[in-house]
Image: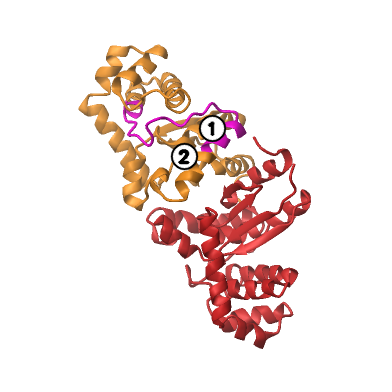
Chain colours: A orange, B red
Amino acid sequence: MSKGPIEFYFEFGSPYGYFAAQEIDALGEEFGRDVIWKPFMLGTAFKETGTKPFMDVPLKGPYAVSDWERMGKYTKTPWKLPEKFPAAILAPGRGFYWLMHQGKSLSAKKFAKAAYKAYFADNRPMWTNEETADVAAECGIDREEFLQAVQSPEIKALLIEEGQAAIERGVFGSPFIIVDDEKFWGWDRLPMVRDWLKNGKW
Amino acid sequence: MSKGPIEFYFEFGSPYGYFAAQEIDALGEEFGRDVIWKPFMLGTAFKETGTKPFMDVPLKGPYAVSDWERMGKYTKTPWKLPEKFPAAILAPGRGFYWLMHQGKSLSAKKFAKAAYKAYFADNRPMWTNEETADVAAECGIDREEFLQAVQSPEIKALLIEEGQAAIERGVFGSPFIIVDDEKFWGWDRLPMVRDWLKNGKW
């Protein structure tokens, strides 16, 4: 069995991505696999698939809201529907790739978890650069450097490129997990990912 | 804890409904709950939510095809993508409610399982009344009566009414499970349904 990494694609504005983010590293550790976090902008994939955000869809919207609420309890993860949702959560993805670009992958992952929690548990306005820089600073990252980075055209382009690369790999939702080239869409598929890691191809 | 039934909503043309149909009765039995099968036409719900069938969506289509393939192996369920898919699979739902209408719920469930298998494992043209009547006959149901029933306006109306009632309850996908008024969308949520049945509200 190959021991390649687990690629964890997610969008910073995605509740199901947030829930998966609580479990994915433990899964990698259990089976001796690296987990590569890959934030991307789901909006680009949605344009490709003609998908609308849950909240804008009749029937699905109310279902999703109560689903996230119970999932918080079910998975024992702090959860509070943000006041502004959905929202374009861009600075966290930009900041993440800026850190990765400097080889600071541990710091990037720590920041990603903090950014997710800030938005989906603590109702902080993560669609702003300023608040995101605050969260970065709380993770020990230089606030001013971070603020400058997330506004630079190079870093903005980096997030867009990662999103394009994700679509080219077939990613269309959040979370989306690829391991040994096998694709898994959705938090609900974590048990199947586990089975794959344990027993390999079905 | 209340011991109300498990309502199992599904569409006869839905692969994920087919996979859930293999497990739902055992789940009910394990926890002493009746399982009420409720076929409906997903197309009506799709109109409500503006959803397209998987197959027609870029990225999602190819993912779904390979997902069903592996799910057959993962769940040890016979699977073969039908030559004509998606298709309007109407006669099985009509026949099902005709049987239910006569109080033949055991026969209806047996037929439903046979109809699902005929389409998703044996590649039989279940979009035709004739083939569906053959499957009914194999389940010990009078072929001619069945054939007449599925073409009657009353029975056709019954399936439409059930679909409307499903939407009014908030059903928008297949499979869709309601137990104690709690809603679960998708085959992937069966473990959560089990947890609900075992431990109740989170």
User: What residue type is disc 2 on?
Assistant: Pro
Residue bearing the label numbered 2? A175
User: Looking at the image, can residue B14 be seen?
Assistant: no
Give whichever of A202, A136 is nearer the camera.
Answer: A136
- Residue B196, quarter of picture: top right
Task: Residue B17: give x, y in percent of width and height.
Answer: 58, 59
Q: Nearer the viewer, mark 1 or mark 2?
A: 2
Measure how far apart labels 1 and 2 are at the Cα level. Answer: 10 Å
Callout 2: SS? loop
Give whichever of A43, A184 is nearer the camera.
Answer: A43
Instruction: Please tell me which residue is depicted at 41% across the width and 49% down the height of the picture.
Output: A57
User: What residue type is disc 1 on?
Assistant: Ile
Chain label for disc 2:
A
Q: Residue furthest bottom?
A: B144
Is residue A173 positioned above or below B111 on the image?
above
Task: Residue B183: give x, y in percent of width and height.
Answer: 59, 48
Query: Any magenta on residue A91?
Result: yes
**Magenta residues (range):** A68-94
Task: Residue B51: give x, y in percent of width and height.
Answer: 41, 57
Give whichever of B120, B39 is nearer the camera.
Answer: B39
Chain label for disc 1:
A
Is residue B161 positioned above or below B16 on the image?
below
Residue bearing the label numbered 1? A24
Give whichever of B162, A158 is nearer the camera.
Answer: B162
Query: Any magenta on residue A5?
Result: no
Q: Could you tell whether B42 is left or right of A98 in the image?
A: right
User: Looking at the image, can residue A160 be seen?
Assistant: yes
Is residue B166 positioned above or below B101 on the image?
above
For marks 1 and 2, the one nearer the N-term is 1
